[in-house]
Image (spheres, helix red, strand yellow):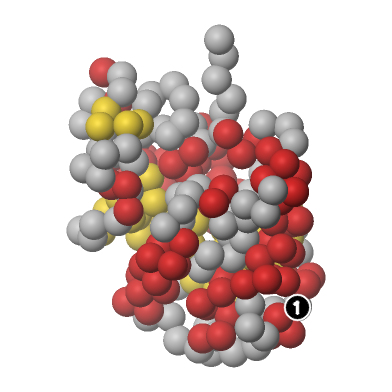
Amino acid sequence: MAHPVSPYLVPGFYDTALAKGRHRDIVGGRWDETGRIQMQILQDAGMLPQHRLLDIGAGSLRLGCKAVPYLEPGHYWATDASRALMLRGRAVELAEPDRLPEHHLIEDSAFAMPGIPTTMDFAIAFGVFTHLPLTTLQAALIQMRPRLLQLRRLLFTVFLSPDPAAGSRRQPDGVVTHTDRPPYHFSAADVVQACTGSGWCATAEQIMLPRGQVLIAATSAP
């Protein structure tokens, strides 16, 4: 039986989850812990309240509910395959929804970033490419490069395996990753090549993340 490229792309996935009130559950759990980790990563990277943040694959604003109060009003932008999911997060997770204009929440499953300003300072995709194949990561990095020319840092997570072709691998935090279905793992060399081949310089950060994800920090190549 063929597996979906990503569980989030199964028809009706978001509608069903929202109807059941599961807007937190479907973004991977560990809601508060993961949001705090993401904020710490960004602040450690130098993000200040005056900076502009793009949250790629923002879901129901697990990060947004912490970043929006920290950043100056209007400095948070987000994309996701489901705008309805982001709007649900804005409605129920933000103490001051007016700090986040609705038009800053953009439906985008192809990483085309329609309407995203080119003035973003930081971008983060946490737990996004863990559910997508390497070809999608490569295509996304290519598309993001000309759209985010002023970016100080692009931060994203992946699962790594020393031998991806060997099949499934149990990660340090217990999750089992795969070569051919989600959650996916890649070799470190393939991730670096995907970055350099699309105009980014990347390094893997030494930080323990939920489920054994690895944080990749990328900047635009000279």
Q: Where, quadrant-wise, is the C terminus in this rendering?
A: bottom left
Secondary structure of the residue carrying numbered label 1: loop
x, y percent for residue 53: 55, 73
Residue 52 position in % (x across, y down): 57, 79
- Left or right of 158, for residue 72: right
- Number of marks present in the image shown: 1
Q: Position of residue 86 (x, y in %)?
A: 68, 61
Query: In the image, residue 91 lies at what x, y percent?
Result: 72, 71
**Label 1 sits on residue:** 101
Image quadrant containing the N terminus = top right
The residue that appears at 59% across and 89% down in the rendered structure is 72
| Residue at 45% in and 86% down | 48
Nearest the eye: 207 or 65: 65
Q: Callout 1, which amino acid? A: Pro
Residue at (23, 25) in percent of width and height: 163
- Spot the residue most to the right: 103
